[in-house]
Amino acid sequence: MLFNSLDFAVFLPIVFGLYWFVTRQNLKLQNALLLISSYVFYAWWDPRFLALIVLSTLTDYIIGKQLNHATSSAYRKRLLALSLVVNLGMLGFFKYYNFFIASFQDAFSLFGQPLEIRGLSIVLPVGISFYTFQTLSYTIDVYRKRITPSKDLLAFATYVAFFPQLVAGPIERASHFLPQVLRKRKFNYKWAVSGVSLIIWGLFKKVVIADNCAFFVNQIFGDPAAFSGLELFLGAVLFAFQIYGDFSGYSDIAIGVSRLLGFDLMTNFRFPYLSKNIADFWRRWHISLSTWFRDYLYIPLGGSRLKTLLNVRNVLIVFLVSGFWHGANYTFIVWGAIHALLFLPLLLRGKNRLHLREQSIKPIEVLKMILTFALVTVAWIYFRSDNVATANQYLLEMISGSWVDLSFFTGRFKYLLLFLIAMSSIIIMLAHEIKAYKLAQREVRLSAFLKLFYCLLIVFMGAFKNPLEFIYFQF
Amino acid sequence: MRRFLKHSLLFLGVFLILANGLSWMSLYYLRKSEFYKPSFALQKSGEQLDYIVLGSSTGLTTLNTQTIDSITGLQGVNLSMDDTSMPIHALMLEHFLAQGGKVSSCVLVFDAGQMNQQTLQQSGNAYRFLPFIQEDYVADYYRASDNTLLSRSEWLPMIGVGYYNAELFYPGLFSAIKPQRHNRFDARGNYSYPNSGGSNKEDTDLMTFRFDNPWYKKIKAVCAANNIELILYHPPKFKSEVKSDTAVSNFINHSQLLQDTTFFYDELHVNSEGRQLTSVAFANEFSKRIKK
């Protein structure tokens, strides 16, 4: 079920009504409602893959309990390994099996030994990268004795499958979310209103910004050779805003819906295109994933407290794995590598932890923001392209092609109109974000009047005819 | 909770009033303008017309009614619309007549492939008729289409206008300022592709078709009921020959009229020069039939 669908517009009020009016007095019943709603929400897409969520839930619930009782260090390690094998095994099979087969075949062909292994026709279950990481973090935290394992299967299953964030995050930690599932929720007017604000803001970013940008991006990235340098440049910029509007829009709606149900999810985006360097960008972009990698990969590897070469190795590993997490394609690995290369100079100069003053934006800082955005956008070209060669070609054509031809955007009335809608909505969004940034707010806040205004903009500027799935569903 | 629900309902109410009010306004201005063909047809329905041309982009860009009129001495308008198919042509005829239009002949420009289609499915590209959603025939059309939700625009115009916002809302605003402006057609409803393009096609196709399309049958029935002579016309198609498997007297087949690629914009559409030649050829045939 998509957040921007009519199905969800019917589903949410029903869940909201049952949640606050029918099951409010009984926590178990309320959690059961959340779990059933979450499974319905997921099954709307494909009920077969519910089994994977159930498998992941039961595995980590049982392993968590066993870890609590186990005293032998070796046994505890075996339990942790079992959780890793089940979760990463599922992820590896559904997401990476064909990629590895193809890579092996390519490698063997290089040495003149063709390898005949057939790939499988595998459907990638929506959200598998998100909920497997969520359950993994639980088991690792129990293993490290940072949290006590859940004794309530219903609460644990609700934590794993909580529908607002099930398919595209934020990737919640058990230490933050499970206690909320276990305690009685009270309806809070201000909290709910802020949730509505975020839902409207998220829908605006998804339906108006991302989907209108997608109209151009899909055509430009579909056949880069047919476009001028300026058009390719605009295509890359529009993709930067498409993916931001799409993914952060989803997170905003997820957080907003959770607030309506009395939950607090972690902030996943904090104005990333106002970052002053790449390190800053990664503190603002997909925060739940970057902190996941920090806590469960980077720090266990030694973080940045080792010798320089080892520090460099750690950064490279984290960024490459992060790229690979996004998909089974070399483009994502190159994307991760570019970010690593941009991050390393900051690490080596000790500027990766700089606490930046958010209250003011000086002219020099604006230049840094523009430069960071430009670098991030170049990396996005690899992220969006079908393969690395196409991305290289895209970059070459962008630099060498004509920088005066803009006919693709201006040649037809409809295209010009959609381009103006996309650009004006981006400017509107940035204006709000700059204001919130200066006030050191963690999210954009909308008055009642602005909420109404954005609802009207969604109706009259949204791209409804060809609704697109959220990009991060495929990850 | 009570406060939240009260405020939510109030918010929803104000939003629905504003969104529907703005949508209704945009549809109103579109209806009063000549921006799209259905509104243009409404304005032309008061004129004394001898013929109308119905069709999709090939009808729009092949037959120039100004050329035809200058040769035949008749008065006609082109009501063809790009990106449409037979169901929309039938809807356009119904609309023209329902708005009080009177005409002696109707030229239906079709493609052989289109005529072979047996499906009764509605064409989804009927947004240009949404300003007339209050008319039963338009509402019925939407009710029978895949996206039945759009038929609710009768009572909640924000549904249709929101869905087709780029096609309806902004043109509606534009029409409020310039009601005489046409969307890619001239004062008589014609449009022409430039003298460029062409086609690389090498082999000639042969396509046989039968007059079986259910929407064609509907157009035929409406014409018969209103005493309108129906002329069937197949436009030039580069390196394509089309043949009907049944002899039909009111069929003008110009599929092979033009052989040179310089007369084509692409495989399906003639360019400006091709349009001139085709319109003259059609006008000569058409006037012979009128004289009969």
Image (cartoon, coloured by chain):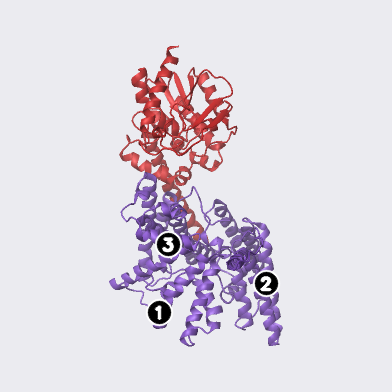
The image quarter containing residue B173 is top left
Q: Which residue is mark 2?
A: A86
Q: Which chain is purple?
A: A
Q: Chain of mark 1?
A: A
Q: Residues within 10 Å of mark 1 (few under 14, many from 20)?
A: some
Of marks 2 and 1, which one's residue comes earlier in the chain? 2
Amino acid type indicated by mark 3: Ala
Amino acid type indicated by mark 1: Leu
Q: Residues within 10 Å of mark 3 (few under 14, many from 20)?
A: many
Disc 2 secondary structure class:
helix
Q: Which chain is red?
A: B
Give me the residue at 45% from left, 71% from top: A338
Q: Quadrant of the N terminus of chain A?
A: bottom right
Q: Quadrant of the C terminus of chain A?
A: bottom right
Q: Which residue is mark 3?
A: A240
Q: Is residue B47 left or right of residue A126?
A: left
Amino acid type indicated by mark 2: Val
**Mark 3 vs mark 2, CA separation in Å:** 35 Å
Instruction: Indicate which disc residue A346 carries.
Output: 1
Q: Is residue A121 visible?
A: yes
Are the residues at dot 3 and dot 2 in contact (C-beta closer than 8 Å)?
no
Mark 2 and mark 1, same subunit? yes
Give me the residue at 52% from left, 19% from top: B224
Residue A213 vertical placement versus A263 (above, below): above
Front position in the image: A130 or A458: A130
Front position in the image: B278 or A389: A389
Residue A398 vertical placement versus A407 (above, below): below
What is the x, y in percent for residue B144?
A: 56, 36
Are the residues at dot 3 and dot 1 in contact (C-beta closer than 8 Å)?
no
Disc 1 secondary structure class:
helix
**Mark 3 vs mark 1, CA separation in Å:** 23 Å
**Mark 2 vs mark 1, CA separation in Å:** 37 Å
